[in-house]
Image: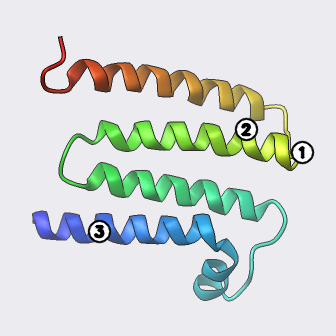
Amino acid sequence: MKGALIFAAVGEVATGLALLIVPSLVGRLLLGEEPTGIAIPVARVAGIALIALGIACWPGPPRIGMLIYSATVALYLAYVGVAHGLTGPLLWPAVVLHAILTGLLALLWFRDRPGAT
């Protein structure tokens, strides 16, 4: 069972990295069409989520997967808003929410690790 979970985790991380780095290629290989426009940042957020899912499924504390997801999606959404000007009414509230979640999850992670006081 542990081997299957590790295999699934590696597969999710690999797919997530591919979506993050080359979303057009993944879209073409999976769906026969290249994503364009707003589909590119959405595919990259999905890639971030798959990487975090793979990390959460890896043997160890699953909380680290959510911490990584929250931190990277906050940074990526902020980047999309600043560098590309893609801003809907919920972009900055989502960035702030994920930044707060990242802080809370980091506090929990530091508090619960072995040797923490």
Residue 38: where, in percent of width, then height?
A: 81, 59
Q: Quick check: 45 above or below 94?
A: below
Q: CA distance from mark 2 to mark 3?
A: 30 Å
The residue carrying pointer 1 sits among few (fewer than 14), some (14 to 19) or many (20 or more) residues within 10 Å by Cα, namely: few
Residue 95: where, in percent of width, then height?
A: 67, 31
- Residue located 58% across and 83% down the image: 30
Q: CA distance from mark 1 to mark 3?
A: 36 Å
In the picture, measured across the screen, residue 108 lies left or right of residue 116, that is right
Label 1 or label 3, whichever lies nearer to me, is 1
Label 2 or label 3, whichever lies nearer to me, is 2
Where on the picture, by quarter, is residue 89? top right
In the picture, measured across the screen, residue 80 lies left or right of residue 116, that is right
For the C terminus, the image quarter is top left
In the picture, measured across the screen, residue 40 lies left or right of residue 2, that is right
Residue beneath label 1, please?
A: 85
Q: CA distance from mark 1 to mark 2?
A: 10 Å
Q: Amino acid at mark 1?
A: Gly
Which mark sits nearer the N-terminus, 1 or 2? 2
Q: Amino acid at mark 3?
A: Ala
Residue beneath label 2, please?
A: 78
* SS state under label 2: helix
Question: Residue 22 shows which numbered tag?
Answer: none
* SS state under label 1: loop
Residue beneath label 3, please?
A: 8
Residue 54: where, in percent of width, then height?
A: 35, 58
- Residue located 29% across and 68% down the image: 8
Residue 101: where, in percent of width, then height?
A: 50, 25
Q: How many marks?
A: 3
Where on the picture, by quarter, is residue 107? top left
